[in-house]
Image (cartoon, helix red, strand yellow):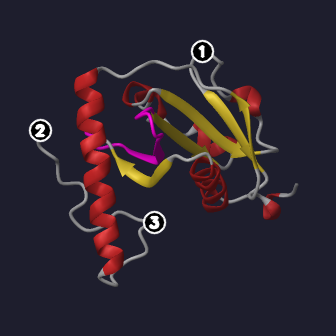
Amino acid sequence: MQDSDAITTSRITDAVARMFVERGDACLREFTLRTGRRVDIIAIDSGGRITIIEVKSSRQDFLSDRKWHEYPEWADRFYFAVADDFPRDILPGSDQCGIIITDGFDCLELRSAPESRLAAQRRGHLTRRIAHVAMRRLEFINSGNGTGEKPAPGEDDEVSG
């Protein structure tokens, strides 16, 4: 695959979000954590298990990212999602993350993520925050002002409780 043929972050994100939705999970893109860091995808399954997926489109994208180390403490599971030709040997080990690969359409969970259950208080806060953000995005779409793929105005406001 040549550089001009590289799978974009957007295509990786679309494919991975579709994979999680097809599994029955709900997903949000570009979700801001309490820390102010914005994750690429956050998913929640029907049992309340929270997964964060960090999308990396190139070696340079991964090597220049210093924020991903903060994400696992905000999820039960943490994955990197990459193109199928990404140099996977540079990704962290199986004790830190799972790996999802994609050709931009289909996805394969190459390595399952280790599970580390969130504390009840953090899970409660995060679940309320996910619901709040999702509802704001839906209303923003319904009012004709957006697509739901990007944060709605005021979305970074903190949810109390």
Q: Residue 95 shows which numbered tag? A: 1
Question: Around disc 1, counting alpha carbons within 10 Å, would you say few (fewer than 14), some (14 to 19), or many (20 or more)?
Answer: few
Helix, strand or loop at label 1? It is: loop
- 43 sits left or right of 157 in the view: right
Rounded to the nearest angstrom, the CA distance separating label 1 from label 3 is 31 Å
User: Between 161 and 47, which is closer to the camera in this rendering?
Assistant: 47
Residue 151 lies, with reference to residue 21, above or below; the image says: below
Instruction: Give the percent coordinates (x, y) of residue 100.
Output: 69, 39
Residue type (three-letter) at the residue carrying disc 1: Asp
Task: Report the label total.
Answer: 3
Residue that label 2 marks: 161
Residue type (three-letter) at the residue carrying disc 2: Gly
Instruction: Give the percent coordinates (x, y) of residue 1.
Output: 88, 54
Question: Around disc 2, counting alpha carbons within 10 Å, would you say few (fewer than 14), some (14 to 19), or many (20 or more)?
Answer: few
Helix, strand or loop at label 2? It is: loop
Q: Which residues are magenta?
A: 34-49
Q: Does the CB distance between marks 2 and 3 fall below 8 Å?
A: no
Residue 116 lies, with reference to residue 29, above or below; the image says: above
- 42 sits left or right of 59 in the view: left
Residue 108 lies, with reference to residue 92, above or below; the image says: below
